[in-house]
Image: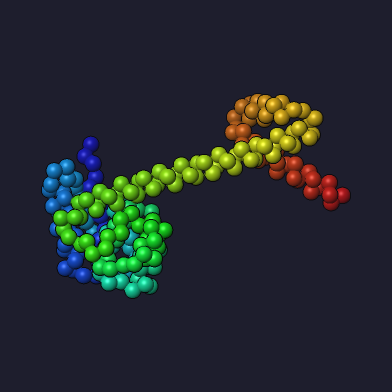
Amino acid sequence: MAQRPLRILIIDESPVRAAILEEGLREARNGEGGGTFEIHRIRDTVSLLGRIASVDPDVIFIDLESPSRDTLEQMFQVSRLARRPIAMFVDKSDGATVQAAIDAGVSAYVVDGLRKERVRSILELAIGRFHAFDRLQSELQQAKSALEDRKIIEQAKAILMRQRGCSEDDAYVLLRRTAMSQNRKIAELARSLIAASALIRTGAASE
């Protein structure tokens, strides 16, 4: 089964600079290990997010030449919302702007480096960094979720220990056994137990 082309979106008001990017992509496609690209271009920033969504690109190249701070902030907003590898080209920058680009999730922030022979390496860099960052974010979210689950289970065990006068180990065994019999996750059952306990307390307090 043939692999679909890599859909690349170029956001650039300058036809000359956009042509440099397109030429670099053509050379990358024709070179060793090159793939097939489907190139789209947006020439202005009117209704930008909606137009990006309609293209649904795999990678975004943003060429800003000498952008104003408002334009940069708009592009950083695109980066935060688009959730795609983004390579951003600017003529000049400063430390604060570079940090803002990193915070916004820009995968490759290239200052004064728009040359067609660099396009392939920047494309690979943007994709590689995006996937690495995405993996880190996923692992961080999983770790946070696991920590939250442990806290919930500890609270549920405390409720069972108080209500049944059992040990911590016995409370956990009861949670695990009940979760298995109901085909539920222990953390899910623990949340239900905590919610039910809170409801009972609220009802008792109102009497």
Residue at 54% of width from left, 44% of height from top?
Answer: 144
Note whether residue 56 is visible: no
Coordinates of residue 52 in the picture (x, y in percent): 33, 60
The residue sitting at 55% across, 42% down in the picture is 145
x, y (%) of residue 81? 41, 58
Residue with the most extreme front position: 95
Q: Residue furthest right?
A: 207
Could you say which quadrant of the image residue 115 lies in? bottom left
Residue 126 shows up from this direction:
yes
Left or right: residue 73 versus residue 89 is right
Q: Taking 194 as reference, is 35 left or right?
A: left
The N terminus: image quadrant: top left
Count of marks placed on residues: 0
Vertical placement of residue 148 versus 79, above or below: above
Residue 64 location, quadrant = bottom left
Quadrant in the rendering for residue 189: top right
Q: Residue at x 23, y 64 (%)?
A: 112
Q: Provide residue 177's location: percent of width, then percent of height.
A: 65, 25
Q: Residue at x 79, y 45 (%)?
A: 201
The image's colour scheme reads: rainbow
